[in-house]
Amino acid sequence: MTALFISDLHLDDSRPHITSLFEHYLAGDEVRQADALYILGDLVEAWVGDDDDAKLPNRIARATTAVRDAGVPVYFIVGNRDFLLGETYAKRAGMTLIEDGAVHDLYGTPTLLMHGDVLCTDDVAYQQLRRQLRSPEWKAQVLAMPLEARRTLAAKARAESRSYTSGADETLMDVNADAVAQAMHNAGVTHLIHGHTHRPAIHHFQLDGQTAERIVLGDWYEQGSVLRVGPEGSQLRTISD
Ligand code: LP5
């Protein structure tokens, strides 16, 4: 009995070995024998819309659909790179979209599931940008643009973000402890799993007089990062081909 968690794969044509590692992992016994596979955002480097006719979205959909067809549900929370991924693609890829902040029961433990960007409240510039990009009006306006224009815009946004993050204070880009405590308190949980910060770790701390746990998933830039959760506990590890 195992639920598997991955995030921050940032799949992109510039890192073909990571796409192959993803496909290989999803085709393997660990995934095919799991109770569920959760993808907590940033599956791709930049998602420009469900109508993207590039090869990568098709490869991903083939891999995830095969998991679903093997009887393993695939749950997906959008991240800051793929917040434009919608129901059309999710259906095609055999994935079930769930809310950022959903609580799922994992072997008797209610667990809060997030991408994690919303917890980085010290990063005021990012939170302002996030509010703008997640508004239904902005999304509708952008999705009405021609595909090629969206690709150009995404590339510009990536370049600007790279420039911003390379100069930003490291602590600014981590989660804020009060925001974590508030989110967990509001959800009524003592367990949280998220990605986004690329700082894989299992943190234990006190919350409302109880021991709480926050698990941070790792990114897939150089190798894979996988969290296994079962009735006996959690194991966070890296994988490679
Ligand atoms: O992503 P990462 O790790 O580099 O940094 C994030 C925050 N940045 C972002 C911006 C995204 O990277 C932009 C790419 C989105 C691609 C998909 C959208 C496609 C839509 C376009 C199709 C039409 O999320 C960064 C945080 C960091 O995490 C850590 O938490 O610090 O925040 C910033 O970079 C804040 C800056 O103020 C952002 C300034 C540049 C963004 C300009 C966006 C203009 C809008 C264009 C459309 C996306």
Image (tube, rainbow, N blue to C red):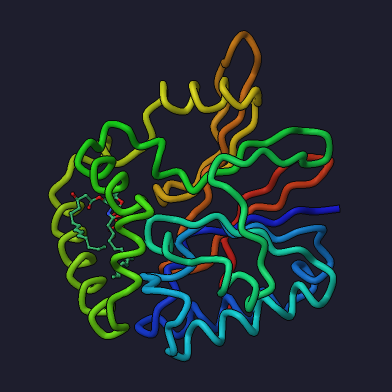
Q: Nearer the viewer, residue 139 or 161?
A: 139
Placement of the C terminus among the 4 image quadrants: bottom right
Q: Nearer the viewer, residue 149 or 15?
A: 149
Q: Quadrant of ligand 1?
A: bottom left
Q: Nearer the viewer, residue 74 or 130?
A: 130
- Which residue: 56% across, 34% down? 214
Q: Nearer the viewer, residue 32 or 91?
A: 91
Spot occupied by residue 186 in the image (x, y as percentages of width and height)? 56, 22
In the depicted structure, whether residue 159 falls above or below residue 130 = below
In the image, is 197 to the left or to the right of 149?
right
Spot occupied by residue 240 in the image (x, y as percentages of width and height)? 56, 72
- Picture quadrant where residue 222 is located: bottom left
Spot occupied by residue 74 in the image (x, y as percentages of width and height)? 70, 64
In the image, is 236 to the left or to the right of 12?
right
- Which residue: 55% across, 21% down? 205
Spot occupied by residue 46 in the image (x, y as percentages of width and height)? 36, 70
